[in-house]
Image (cartoon, rainbow, N blue to C red):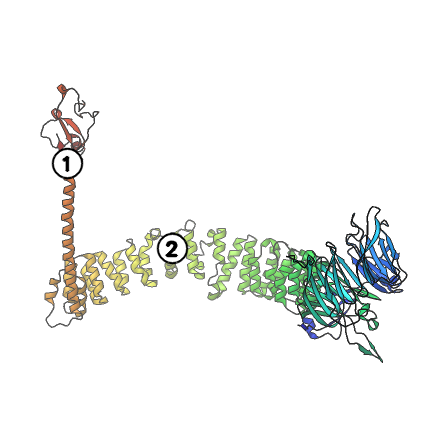
Amino acid sequence: MATSTPDKRQVDPDYAEAEGSDSEESEEDSEPKLKYERIGNDLKNKLLSKDCVSCLAVHPKFLAVGTHWGMIHIFDHAGNAVRDKEIAAHTTTVNQLSIDDNGDHVASCSDDGRVMISGLYSADNNQSINFDRPVKAVAIDPKFGKYGSGKNFVTGDDKLILNEKGGLFNRHKTVLLHQGEGLIREIKWKGDFIAWTNDHGVKIFDMSSRSRITFISKDHNYRPDQYQCSMCWKDSHTLLLAWADKVKVCVVKDREDRDARDLPQRYVEITAMFTLDSFACGISPLNNSLVILTFEKDGQGEGNRQVSKRPHLLIVEPHMDYFEEISNDALSVRGFQEYKPRDYHLVTYFSETITDENLFYIVSPKDIIISKERDTDDHIAWLLEREDFEEAMDIVEKNQHLLRKHSQKDVAKQYLEFLLENDNFVEAARQCSRILGKNKELWEEEIWKFHSHKQLKVLAPYIPQNEPRLSPAIYELVLYDFLNTDCEKFLSVVKEWPSDLYNVQTVITATLDRLDRERNNTTLLRALGELYTLEKQYEKSLAIYLKYYSIAKPKDRLGNTDVFKLIHKYSLFSSISDKIVQLMEFDGDQAAQLLIDNMDKLPIEQVVKQLENNEKFLFTYLDKVCQKDQQLCQAYHGQLVKLYAEFAPKKLLPFLKSSIHYPLQRAMDECQIRRLVPEQVYLLGRMGDLKKALTLITTELKDVNQAIEFCKDKNDEELWADLIKFSIDKPTFIKGLLHNIGTHVDPIRLIPQIKVGMKIPGLRDSLVKILQDYNLQMSLREGCRKILVADSFNLLDRLVKTQRRGISMDSSQVCPICQQHIIVTDLRYASNVVLFYCRHAFHEDCLPTHSMERCTICSTQRRGPGSKGMVK
């Protein structure tokens, strides 16, 4: 049974990838697995024109073709005859050919009873043996050409005979390996194993143990002469069988344990087997899959007769009792209508190490077709046919070393042409960097194509500026295109591209011509300013920018920093010394910042003089100076008071608190005019009019908390009295006072003055807080007292212990007065010693008075503790 069966594909080998007209649409979605090519040249012109192929053997070096006339022809893989390599080996049909691994010898057999061993390069090992009966199969030892190999080969008729040379005189001898089960029609020798087929099944002989290890029955009732078994060794231990409609995969394995039955050391396990819907004419491996040449069981009508259908080449994945069909190609073989299953053969050359060297030869009497796996070139061609250029490009980039027919350049050009033809300009532009790489000629060619489609705007972001660097005319072409079609893009490109890519003066001339027609085009003015800057004509550039700012709309000027960058970068401060007001009109913040950053070139006095008639600009400038360092503009703090009061009242109070370089009365007048009460309170406090300040707080601001903080800050008893007096008839003020003055004013001053019956919100809470504050104060005082007493006792105790401690004195110490040693060994000169706690020691007799309690040295130096007190 089969699963996942794809639609059949009809293939004509003359057109390796062509599909028949009856292909289904679904085939277009799946890529073919194989490609086909009919062998021509001498094989077609000289052999097939007068003879028919009966068998084929393939070696990496050549092809050996057996014919019905008994000839053996040697061709290269392209079908060209190899000179002097035509062997007249037999008089009738060649049944089978076999080549040793080195390709030095070809074994052949025929119905004429002869078996020939023909050396292609030497006749030393040539053999011709006549068996007097038709020989259907032959297999040469793969190591036949090696020294000491025994020159073995196996023949099959109704017996399987091993032919070898050995002994003292190197004589030919035969060994009968098998007989009695009908004709042996095919033999395959690989490594140590010889496999052969007879009328009953397949058997395998192990040359290493000289024993037969298995028998595999044919499992069908078809005639073996009409539906011959096809065998192929996948590797040295795996045999593939296809017989009629049965397929088997057999693996030779080593037996792990020997038992008493004396079984062979090796056995065969069938790992996969299944039944086809058609007859198998040949089998070969393809990685983990199988390639099977099949013949349809049912014929087709052609006129008044039944003829055969096309043979098929299947790729299947084998399983036990079923298979999964991967591909199915119908082949256009010459004369297929007249052929039977026995007329087809599938011969394989495959490498066990290189997977892309698998070649499948489909052999028929009048045709030989090569099938091989599709390579990377074929896959790319298929993708290009489907217009899947993106994937094709990916594969080309990753596999350039594998390509023979395609190149990255060719695929890329096809891809870009496809995108341009379909007006997909965005994707075409995006792909240019990847496709064109560093090829200057290709880039310039594509830019002209985009220009012809009027799509340079799309390509511009991808045009290379280096590696490769294009011709200046190309860059100018792009700029002229933008100049005439998109001024914003023109400005963007002028800013982005380095000036050495094109002739700047030429572009300036073209821009001026355009401005003559559109004098108020602000975008072109900015672009012209950039171009003058690139040409280092900074004065002209500045003039252009100033013109731009004079005609541009405010929303367009906002955030535009071109002129300020130009001034700063090229130090054009001398050029703007008389244009400060104009710059401030463009963007006050940026202009002020520029002026502040360059005070050494544009002093504050010069700027203030120009701005003095425009208070708004003057405020913007002085405010930024003040934020940087107030000391820089202290001469203008008086002006700043008025400017802050006018343009930023919220900044005025912090400024008043941080500066002392302004006239108080003038500041007071400005605040009174604008009724800025907090500022008036602060100024009155600085002027010493505390009562008036408190009155403003209580009457104008009506903020009891601020009034209390003001009184706390000034710590004036009269202020507290005025505040209590003002608050005595105002319950909310009384509440605030009761909550906050407990630690600064005795509450007794306030509580008796409260009128009886006055409703004070939160009175109880306020009284409780007063009591809590009082208790807290008492507790703090008691705690401080206890700490003070404890510290006093501790210090006194430390003093007593220190004074009781002994003081050491060494024998080298001298009296500071007499300069004699304090301690003497001669008692006649001994004297009492006075030792102070400061460690100065004297002879008692040397001191002025014996009752002296202070060290004379420390008293002179006014030292502290230790100088007083002594030890005798």
Question: Who is closer to the viewer here, 214 or 292?
Answer: 214
Quarter the N terminus occupies = bottom right
Q: Name the residue under label 1.
A: 804
Determine the residue positioned at 86% across, 53% down: 127
Q: Mark 2 points at which residue?
A: 608
Horizontal and vertical percent position of residue 295: 77, 71
Left or right of 554 in this view: 182: right
Cα–Cα gap, marks 1 and 2: 78 Å
> Label 1 neighbourhood size at 10 Å, few (<14), some (14-19), many (20+)?
few
Tag of residue 144: none
The answer to which image quadrant residue 380 occupies is bottom right
Left or right of 80 in this view: 782: left
> Label 2 neighbourhood size at 10 Å, few (<14), some (14-19), many (20+)?
some
Horizontal and vertical percent position of residue 203: 75, 62
Left or right of 733 in this view: 658: right
Q: In this view, does 387 lie above or below 64?
A: below
Any part of residue 481 in sight: no
Furthest toward the front, the residue is: 260
Labelled pair 1, 2 in contact (Cβ < 8 Å): no
Question: Who is closer to the viewer here, 333 or 857?
Answer: 333
Label 2 SS? helix
Determine the residue positioned at 19% across, 58% down: 712
Identified by mark 2, the residue type is Val
Any part of residue 58 in sight: yes
Sequence-wise first label, 1 or 2: 2
Furthest toward the bottom, the residue is: 304
Horizontal and vertical percent position of residue 15: 78, 67
The answer to which image quadrant residue 579 occupies is bottom left
Label 1 SS? helix
Q: In this view, does 676 lie above or below 82?
A: below
